[in-house]
Image (tube, grey):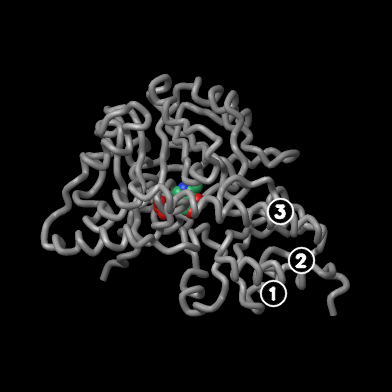
Amino acid sequence: MADVSKKIVPWIMPAVQYKVDSVELAWQHPNHARMFLNENPIPPSEKVLKAIEEMARYGNRYPHRWVQLRKRLAEPFGLGPENVFLGNGSSEVIDNMVRVFCQPGDEVIIPEPTFSLFYARIEVNGAKDVRIPLRKDDYQVDIDGMINAVTDRTKLMIVVNPNNPTGLFVDDNDLRRLLDLGIPTCIDEAYLEYDPSRGSKVPLIKEYPHAFVMKTFSKAYGLAGLRFGYMFGVPELVEAFERIKLPWNVSILTLAAAEAALDDQESLKKKVEHNNRWMAIFTEEFRKLGLKPFPAHGNYMLVDANDFGYSSKEIIDMAFERGVILKTIGPIHGKNGFFRVTPGTDEENKRMLEVVKEIFSQPKAKRA
Ligand SMILES: Cc1ncc(COP(=O)(O)O)c(C=O)c1O
């Protein structure tokens, strides 16, 4: 019998996988503070729950309301439904994006670290991720490094704004320098709602038709489990995404939930305020302990704990033993003592601060 594994297209098995093992672990330990996944700790509002329940009565029907929702999302930017693509979370849009622009062997230029699903979907679709490390001095996206890495195989550029895990925004002029190259560029604004003072880059699609902007309801809107993401682009681009996607990719329940969440701006405001209040407290408390928190703008904070001598995994394991799930971060410029934390409920945040205080009460060298 032929070995079936030899029949699989050659780029699938070597591709890095996007696997968050700790999700299973978190569901198995519901009493642990769940602060590792950039989720929103506040459940959907009554308005959203009611909309889902009402729409469930039409569960025998294929989804509708696509155009209605696209119109609503586009209006604040003076755009139309032809500028909006809806996805099963922005993860789906990320996957579609690679297939829209890349043939096997083509190159995608992307910072490292950033949201790791990008690397996985680039590789599993047969393209090559050309990873450009963040700048060493300030952990900013290295735009010059990205520009210098362009070859005639470069088909796509990626900028996450603010970046995950650093929480830092890319300088506006730097972004324009990248866009001036004329290469298709994804600007991922998954976390932008957490900083209402910052304008979206969506209007740039009028000036740079090769730019497109992704957003999601998984973060500030707090609907990660319902899976709703979307993308703004020029109509030609949106049309290409429409052709790649599977039909009915967003369920009727998700569409209803997204509409209701848009109607419920008061809830959004409360969620953002909760997050930002705790992010400020985290910064203050971490600094008191001698940790170095990043000036982050999303719902996650990268913390430099390198002075204490623990590896990222050791920190995460110690926190887990004490009932708190934090996120490990791979080495950045050879340093392996970072962790990332997402604000949880008030109780979880207080517990996390106690646990972090205990862990970092002494450096590794002194711990018995
Ligand atoms: C930068 C970034 N983009 C997109 C996503 C995925 O969002 P979604 O849940 O909409 O697939 C995440 C999730 O963590 C993210 O960090």
Q: In this view, does 245 lie to the left or right of 302?
A: left
- In the rendered image, which residue does mark 3 sit on? 283
Residue contact at pointers 1 and 2, CB within 8 angstroms: yes
Among the two numbered marks 1 and 2 on one chain, the one whose residue lies closer to the N terminus: 2
- In the rendered image, which residue does mark 2 sit on? 310
Give the secondary structure at mark 1. Answer: helix
Q: In which quarter of the image is residue 237?
A: top left
Quadrant in the picture for the C terminus: bottom right
Residue 17, percent across and down?
A: 46, 59
- In the rendered image, which residue does mark 1 sit on? 318
Q: Is residue 231 left or right of residue 347?
A: left
Give the secondary structure at mark 2. Answer: loop
- How far is the residue under mark 1 from the one under mark 3? 21 Å
Does any atom of ligand 1 lie closer than 8 Å to the CB of label 3? Answer: no
- How far is the residue under mark 2 from the one under mark 3? 20 Å
Can you tell which of label 2 and label 3 is closer to the viewer? Answer: 3
Question: Dot 1: few (<14), some (14–19), or many (≥20) neighbours within 10 Å?
Answer: some
The single residue placed furthest to the left in the displayed view is: 60
Residue nearer the viewer, 233 or 12: 233
Among the two numbered marks 2 and 3 on one chain, the one whose residue lies closer to the N terminus: 3
Residue type marked 3 = Thr
Residue 106, percent across and down?
A: 42, 37
Among the two numbered marks 1 and 3 on one chain, the one whose residue lies closer to the N terminus: 3
Does any atom of ligand 1 lie closer than 8 Å to the CB of label 1? Answer: no
